[in-house]
Amino acid sequence: MEIIKPRTLSGFMELLPANQAQMERIMNILRTTYASYGFAPLDTPIIEDAQILLAKGGGETEKQIYRFQKGDSDLAMRFDLTVPLAKYVALHYNDLAFPFRRYQIGKVYRGERAQRGRFREFYQADIDIIGDGKLDILNEAEIPSIIYNIFNRFGLKRFQIRVNNRKILNGFYAMLGLSEQSGEIMRTVDKLDKIGAEKVKAILMTDCGLSEENADEILKFIAITGTNAEVIAALEGYQGRNEIFDLGLGELKAVTANLAAFGVPEENFAVDLTIARGLDYYTGTVYETTLLDHPEIGSVCSGGRYDNLAGYYIDKSLPGVGISIGLTRLFYVLDEQGLLNPDQNNAPADALVIPMTADPAAAISLAQSLRAKGVRVQVYGEQKKFKQKMAYANKLGVPFAVLLGEDEIAEGKCALKNMRTGQQVTVTAEEAAAQILAFNAELEAAAVILEK
Amino acid sequence: MEIIKPRTLSGFMELLPANQAQMERIMNILRTTYASYGFAPLDTPIIEDAQILLAKGGGETEKQIYRFQKGDSDLAMRFDLTVPLAKYVALHYNDLAFPFRRYQIGKVYRGERAQRGRFREFYQADIDIIGDGKLDILNEAEIPSIIYNIFNRFGLKRFQIRVNNRKILNGFYAMLGLSEQSGEIMRTVDKLDKIGAEKVKAILMTDCGLSEENADEILKFIAITGTNAEVIAALEGYQGRNEIFDLGLGELKAVTANLAAFGVPEENFAVDLTIARGLDYYTGTVYETTLLDHPEIGSVCSGGRYDNLAGYYIDKSLPGVGISIGLTRLFYVLDEQGLLNPDQNNAPADALVIPMTADPAAAISLAQSLRAKGVRVQVYGEQKKFKQKMAYANKLGVPFAVLLGEDEIAEGKCALKNMRTGQQVTVTAEEAAAQILAFNAELEAAAVILEK
């Protein structure tokens, strides 16, 4: 037979089993956290009618999209989860209860130029809350709590959820008579961390044509930092000059007011006036999340409030708020930097049961009773030497091997070997299950993502 | 803004939230059952190099495949999970521990003619065990145990796992000197249920050119039924006439020998000599699973033993055994026949917390403490009349509403309303959590798939 050299396309992530176990653990934390806040899981097709997917059209999206003909159909693969959500909500409007809360963890496709750490197929993990006509600010206030819970369950302490409000920015620029230039100004201000205040000021004056006075005003404004209370107090100094600003400040107060009730510690939260999150889509609160020791990764969870989810598909006002995690890229970076805890149980089983007798019946029964207690068990059925069986257990990385010879069978016991400590004890099936589950619970309680 | 009428492509399943909750429940049973037997979760790209995906080529596959160019690349969407597995195992051969056990629940794509109940994008839920050179028969013996556990956890009793062995069939036809015609004969025998023995005999004689004696021999053979012991005793009557047959009979004995140890009741298992499962791929044990009250659905979980997984990609003998569930089609049929239990909690939350005061802080804190106990909670934040809030709870289908007014806050309690019974009690957060979890556990313990 002629052999075709196997390969996986570049830009497409394909993980080995232990890595995949780490990815599943992260996805599971996302799923259960989203679900704990009452978000419904959603699953929309990966292929949609190209006309519908590109209703908004234009720009980079159209160039990167995977689009093709099949029969008479003009098809395209989704490039995000927001457009399919808009379609879904418009299509099923009458069947949904609003506010409609959904989470979706799914693959999206962008034919970007292949380069290290860039993916053409990648997971996004999104939540959105969609209102019908209106959506209370409480929904915006809840988002930091969800983000906090996710990163806390990852085992992280040194992360910060950064929040701003687009109305505050828009109102502030309107005060200075700079509404027209606000997009350009925000893009410049966004570079503050990278190029410093002096250069930002220079660009504002030369490229954006601002007066020195206005440039100074802007730098003074974005330099406002401190505790939530301090930032809000400073912002109150601008109150009464612009309606939109005042509205935004009110929203920011509402978002910060219940942080304690929502269980978000002050140290993991900051109002940050430099955050803008793109230009058109967001209209209220915006969110970014950074790992404090890894600023180079950028924001790992971002989103915000928008006023019009599905205007292309339905004549209804559907405001919403949502956040998204670029899961594949995040996983890739964490893995590359060695930040994924390698010591959790990333094997496909908790225990490998190894029959030491010709008749495997006792080993099978033992495996079944361990499974009934919640232990993930593989029975090793191959006819190999003992050394090879143990080598297999080691290569799999299972934390326990359970050996069952004639002596153990006669005693109604089994030999339980902890593969990490090397310790071996002779115990009943029940005791074995308890020990395996306790050890596993300990491994699972450890941090998923390391801080170093 | 011009509005584009939203639609979902025909042949692509898109579920409403309650239906999606049912699908997630089924997927979760598959995932946890597969994992309990030590299968590693795998996730391969949906798009592969077309040359690689079509290495085997030919036939229906090539006509149905979604294949397209992107830049210089000739791409195709996977049409099953077996070819990507073969590629994966060949590509990562050196990194895997054999036997390699993986499960994958993923979408596959076939551009079939659209018709009711036929899908172009559908989930397959597969497990496979791949050996390196050899694979012990114990792995084949374990498969019915996995199938049994899945359907048992679905809440079903009236299902049957049917098993045969291709070596027995091939050996038997060789005894009659009919090896050449065996494919044709098996296709004819496969129609037994539909057209009856008389017509099968007629076709065997006219179309396949068999002598009446041989046709009678075949009908007598496939009429062998009874308990496992009875069928095996009858098959032993053919022993010693063909080596392949004897090998197959030995395998069948090994597969049936440990059913009790594997926890598979006799009533859910049958040796069925009419099952062949396609012609070339399978070489040993083959499996089908039928819902006894719904024969029209056909086999809902099928598979078998094969000798050569990845010969197109690697010069290694990689025998394996696997089963597959066509999940999307199964779900569609069950839903259409009203067999999905509608009474489990298919809402996105277990409880809707409804603040009855202007300040939502107490409601938020209550929600957080319920979540800490494992309750999925949505806080209702919209400014609506009480009646509208309760209407929302009803439309969502949440089993509990938790009302928090000034009286309850003063008392340190909350009003817990069971939306199904209408019963309302005033309890602490802790008591509320316990009641919600107990009620939910009861709902989850019910059958997922109904028998009627």
Image (cartoon, coloured by chain):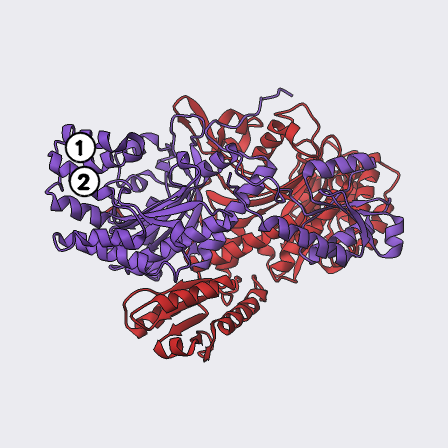
Chain colours: A red, B purple
> Which residue position is annotated with label 2?
B218
Under mark 1, the amino acid is Leu
Q: CA distance from mark 1 to mark 2?
A: 9 Å
Q: Amino acid at mark 2?
A: Ile
Q: Tell whether A131 sits left or right of A7.
A: right
Residue at 69% x, 43% y: name it.
B398
> Is residue B199 placed above or below B90 in the rendered structure?
above
Q: Is residue B92 above or below residue B67?
A: below
Residue drawn at the location 39% of the way across and 26% of the way down = A70
Q: Position of residue A355 (x, y in %)?
A: 35, 70
Residue A206 appears in the rendering: no
Nearer to us in this view, A264 or B56 = B56
A91 or B274: nearer the eye? B274
On residue B204, the disc is 1
Going from N to C along the chain, the mark reached first, 1 or 2, is 1
Residue A74 appears at what percent x and percent y?
45, 25
Dot label at residue B119: none
Number of numbered tags placed on the structure image: 2
Disc 2 element: helix
Q: Are marks 1 and 2 in contact (CB under 8 Å)?
A: yes
